[in-house]
Image (cartoon, rainbow, N blue to C red):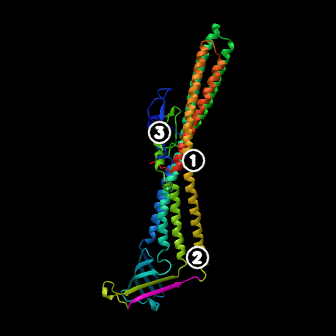
């Protein structure tokens, strides 16, 4: 599929970066907004809701009224052997009771005597019911109840799916931000190395410095240039990784232009965008994963009730009033009726007892899974909180280390200007500062990644 270069004015702000006035910013909030709205996985997750609704509609169809027409005719050697017409209107109800009305009109030379009806046909109206199996729960009732629980389950699963794609997108953005900052850092140090080289070169030409100082300053330039090029490769990879999460409404993938940059973040901004303030009111019982399991268990409970109902005697009865004048109410009489009774009961009930036992085992397994999931989520949230507290302290320490290295480098450069130091010492101090700043950027990235992990552990869904 063809990738389209991202047009700046389409969705990024017009704040200029420090490098050039034409560079643009893609904020974390704007980025996640596009992920939520247009990413295929996010759209696929929304289909879960439609799937649950479709199952519910299908289950409700079990209670739809029905019209059944049965017509059978035989003519042979100019004789009408029989002409059978039977039309029935049925209305299923909740508790295993079905109301129905029937019209029967039969004729023919060789008509079965039991099919004889008046000239205008015969009308019947009555009910059929299950007195054992199917009275308090039957297939229609169970299917509808399970569909209702499944609808809630699909809603929770949809929330989990969106939560996961937001988490993955956030991790990609934080990596892009880290590599962007590393590239900018190496650009600054490369510029410093070039400036320092010019000064040393001028001193060498003036006879104030040895030629070896010029060589060492030039080696430093090449080292910084190499590190910068390597960081640019990492930046390109992470920018493309972020592009994987950007799509347009017509399912067109986007590729971020190299001049588009991530906006610098602070902790409060990340907390606000990912809604981590919900941690204060966190209740593991409201987690989407547990809600999905609760709905699954509720559906299994319905199935267990249905299987238990199969242990009862199967006794189906029907009773219908018969009349040839349905418009006249007094024609319905207890003396004119059609009734039936059907009774069945397996002697050993091995199939039914086996099905019931399997249902109970499924429920037990799901409950064990829920208990384990609840504990895992609680422990994970607590662990991530402690990890974040540690990163706060680590960031404070590394910030002091970086400032100290900056002070050492400044002092060494000042001593060098007075002729009391060397390029070797300056490069050493600068390398130590670079290592410290790289550690600082990695710690920030780990800190933000842990924030994203906390987001997905809390099961937060961004609206």
* Front position among marks 3 and 1: 1
Q: Quadrant of residue 108?
A: bottom left
Q: Position of residue 281 (x, y in %)?
A: 46, 50
Q: Secondary structure at mark 3?
A: helix
State the image coordinates of residue 380 (x, y, percent, origin top left): 57, 50
Residue 432 within the magenta-colored segment of the rendering: no
Q: Which part of the image, by quadrant, shows the N terminus? A: top right
Classify mark 1: helix, strand or loop. helix
Please give the residue where the numbered disc 1 appears in the rendered image: 383
* Residue 74 locus on image (x, y percent): 48, 84
Seen in the picture, residue 343 relative to 240 is either above or below; the reply is below
Give the answer, above or below, for where 93 lies relative to 434: below
The reply to whether dot 3 and dot 1 touch (C-beta < 8 Å) is no
Sequence-first tag of 2 and 3: 3
> N-terminal of the two: label 3 or label 1?
3
Q: Residue sitting at 56 percent across and 46 percent down?
A: 384
Which mark is nearer the camera, 2 or 1? 1
**Image position of 37 with respect to 298: above or below:** above
For label 3, the crowd category at 10 Å Cα-Cα, with few meaning under 14, some 14 to 19 and many 20 or more, is few
Residue 264 appears anywhere in the view? yes
- Magenta highlight: main SS: strand
Which label belongs to residue 268? 3
Disc 2 target residue:
352
Task: Answer left or right for 177 relative to 318.
Answer: right
Query: Which residue is drawn at the image coordinates 57% and 43% (left, top)?
Result: 387
Task: Tell me: 92 left or right of 301.
Answer: left
Work out whether residue 421 or residue 77 is closer to the camera in this orientation and state it.
Answer: 421
Q: Residues within 10 Å of mark 1 (few under 14, many from 20)?
A: few
For label 2, the SS is helix
């Amino acid at each position: 599929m063809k990738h389209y270069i991202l047009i700046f004015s389409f969705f990024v702000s017009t704040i200029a970066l420090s490098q050039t006035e034409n560079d643009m910013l893609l904020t974390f909030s704007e980025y996640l907004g596009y992920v939520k709205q247009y990413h295929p996985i996010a759209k696929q997750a929304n289909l879960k809701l439609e799937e649950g609704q479709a199952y519910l509609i299908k289950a409700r169809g079990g209670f739809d009224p029905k019209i059944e027409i049965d017509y059978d005719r035989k003519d042979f050697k100019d004789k009408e052997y029989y002409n059978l017409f039977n039309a029935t209107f049925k209305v299923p109800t909740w508790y295993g009771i079905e109301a129905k009305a029937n019209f029967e009109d039969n004729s023919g030379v060789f008509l079965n005597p039991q099919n004889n009806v008046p000239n205008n046909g015969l009308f019947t109206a009555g009910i059929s019911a299950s007195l054992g199996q199917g009275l308090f729960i039957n297939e229609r009732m169970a299917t509808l109840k399970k569909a209702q629980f499944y609808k809630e389950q699909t809603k929770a699963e949809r929330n989990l799916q969106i939560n996961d794609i937001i988490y993955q997108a956030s991790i990609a953005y934080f990596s892009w931000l880290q590599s962007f900052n590393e590239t900018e850092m190496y650009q600054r140090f490369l510029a410093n190395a070039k400036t320092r080289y010019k000064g040393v070169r001028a001193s060498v030409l003036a006879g104030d410095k040895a030629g070896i100082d010029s060589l060492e300053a030039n080696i430093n330039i090449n080292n910084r240039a190499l590190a910068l090029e390597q960081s640019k490769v990492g930046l390109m990879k992470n920018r493309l990784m972020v592009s994987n999460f950007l799509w347009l409404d017509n399912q067109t993938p986007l590729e971020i232009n190299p001049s588009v940059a991530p906006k610098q973040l602070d902790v409060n901004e990340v907390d606000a965008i990912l809604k981590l303030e919900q941690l204060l009111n966190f209740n593991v019982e409201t987690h989407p994963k547990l809600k999905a399991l609760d709905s699954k268990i509720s559906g299994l409970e319905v199935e267990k009730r249905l299987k238990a109902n199969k242990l009862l005697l199967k006794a189906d009865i029907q009773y219908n009033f018969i009349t040839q004048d349905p418009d006249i109410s007094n024609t319905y009489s207890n003396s004119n009726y059609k009734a039936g009774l059907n009774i069945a009961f397996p002697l050993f009930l091995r199939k039914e007892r086996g099905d019931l036992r399997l249902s109970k085992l499924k429920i037990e397994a799901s409950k064990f899974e829920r208990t384990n999931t609840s504990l895992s989520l609680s422990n994970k949230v607590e662990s991530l909180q402690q990890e974040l507290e540690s990163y706060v302290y680590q960031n404070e320490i590394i910030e002091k280390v970086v400032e100290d290295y900056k002070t050492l480098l400044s002092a060494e450069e000042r001593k060098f200007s007075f002729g009391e130091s060397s390029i070797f010492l300056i490069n050493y101090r600068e390398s130590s500062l670079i290592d410290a700043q790289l550690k600082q950027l990695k710690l920030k990235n780990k800190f933000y990644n842990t924030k994203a992990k906390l987001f997905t552990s809390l099961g937060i869904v961004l609206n």
